Amino acid sequence: MKKVLYRVFIFSHLLLFAIPVFAQPANFSEVLQIFLNILGMALMILYVGAVLAFVRGIIVFVLNTSDEAKRKEGKQWMLWAVIAFFVGITLWGLVGILTGTFNLTPLVIPQLPEG
């Protein structure tokens, strides 16, 4: 049952990446814009996963002060989360460079309405 739910969860998220593909681009600029939108969605998922991994690493590290193996596991989680942050920031910079080079619409970080 867990495998079925896991597959449904993964498949439903993969469908979200396919939604911009149905836009039927007319030229290379629109194809690149769709690619950058998909990459932007993937980066958001990467950031959320990195934050969750970092928090998990901190919790494992702090709660297991006497068990050296668990502390090492917590350090590994934190290390991989920092690497994921670095990869995400690098890809975000690449998206910015491509956006500026091809005069595309920049990716906008969603913000809450003011007032």
Image (spheres, helix red, strand yellow):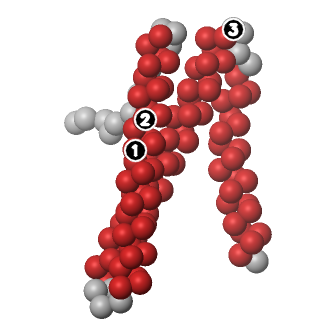
* SS for dot 2: helix
Q: Which residue is mark 3?
A: 27
Q: Nearer the viewer, mark 2 or mark 3?
A: 2
Place residue 112 in its image quadrant: top left
Which residue is at the front of the view, 103 or 54? 54
Query: Is 18 positioned to the left or the right of 97 in the image?
Result: right
Which residue is at the front of the view, 83 or 102? 83
Does label 3 or label 1 sit earlier along the sequence?
3
* Distance CA(mark 3)–CA(mark 1): 32 Å
Q: Amino acid at mark 1?
A: Phe
**Local crowd size for mark 2, using a 10 Å CA cut-off: few (<14), some (14–19), many (≥20):** few
Evaluate if marks 2 and 1 touch, with contact meaning CB atoms under 8 Å apart: yes
Q: Which residue is mark 1?
A: 86
Q: Quadrant of the N terminus?
A: bottom right
Q: Which mark is residue 90?
A: 2
The residue located at (43%, 23%) in the rendering is 96
Q: Nearer the viewer, mark 3 or mark 1?
A: 1
